[in-house]
Structure formats: structure tokens, C-alpha cells
Image (cartoon, rainbow, N blue to C red):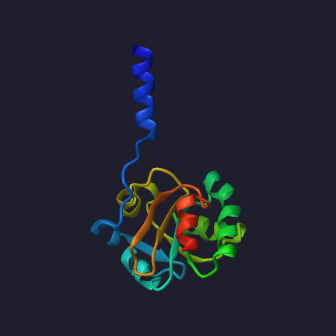
Amino acid sequence: MKKLSLILISFLFFTCKSPEKKEFSTEVLAAPIITFSGDNITFKNLIDHHLGKTTVIDVWASWCSDCIKGLPKLKTLQKKYPKANYVFISLDKNQTAWKNGINRFSIKGNHYYVEGGWKSIFAKNIDLDWIPRYIVIDENGKVLVYRAIEADDSRVINVLEN
């Protein structure tokens, strides 16, 4: 009986997910972001800049092996769904590593940097627990997919196809 209870509890623990968030918190919207050209903006400014199209946000870092392994899937998305915006937010340790990573891996899209990495206001307020992390927002800035860790996640694909 104990074994069955343990199995049931384990099953429930690993299969229950928290509901997807549908909007960003005030804290994350105010989080500082650095543009590729070095300008300081907020995450809300970033979202506002990309309104009008569905936007796929990839939170990544050049030192992250899962991020690098996932790039071919992301590049496939970019080819298959070219009408979407592709935004990359780096958690690299410094801006040099970030920009070198963009060049080394030939990542096409709109690039931003978050100072402080995992400890940043941005990371804490999107409940970041893994990278890569994909977030998809619609043309009005509404969150459609809050947490995906694979570029070819079925929810990401469904949003891009519709």
C-alpha cells in the first residue's frame, strides 16, 4: 500500500502543472533590458516595439548547452513561420559573451541582454527555472504561451500556425 501511495503521489507531482500565465506582472514589465545598440529600455518597451505580429521570445545564454542544441529547431521555426517576430533575450554573464554568441551561432532576430542573468528582476519575475525558455505573445502583447522549453513545443507550433 505504501508503494502504491508513493507511486500515486509521484505521478501527481510530476503531471500537475501550474496554469499558464496570460499576462506579465508589473514587475517584469518594468524590468530593465539592454538593446543590441546599448540602449536601456524596459521589458514593456521591448513588447511594445514588437506589437503587430506574433512574437516568439527565446530566453537563452551562449554558455547554455540546451540553448545551443535547441537552435536548429528554432531556426526551422524561423524558416517555416517567417511572419513572426523572433526576440532573443540573453542571460549571458557579460555583453561581450552575448554578442560573441550571436555571431558564433549565427542567430537571426532581435537581440536583447539582461544584466544579472538568473538573479535579474526579469528572470525572477517570469519564474525562470530553465533555459532555453520560449514565450509567445500575440500581436497585441497578450501572452499565448508562457513557458515552453523546446522551440518545437506543440503549443508554440499551434500558435504560429493559427
Which residue occupies the foreground of this view, 91 or 54? 54
Residue furthest to the top: 1
Q: Residue at x 55, y 66 (%)?
A: 158
Please give left or right for residue 82 compared with residue 143 in the image.
Answer: right
Percent of width and height locating residue 134: 52, 62
Instruction: Tell me if I can see residue 92 in this picture.
Output: no
Which residue occupies the foreground of this view, 77 or 44? 77
Rendered-image quadrant of the C terminus:
bottom right
Which residue occupies the foreground of this view, 12 or 27? 12
The picture quadrant where one finds residue 29 is bottom left
Q: Residue at x 62, y 57 (%)?
A: 67
Residue furthest to the left: 26
Instruction: Determine whether 69 is above or below 115 in the image.
Output: above
The picture quadrant where one finds residue 160 is bottom right
Rendered-image quadrant of the N terminus:
top left
Q: Residue at x 44, y 29 (%)?
A: 10
Instruction: Determine whether 101 is above or below 130 in the image.
Output: below
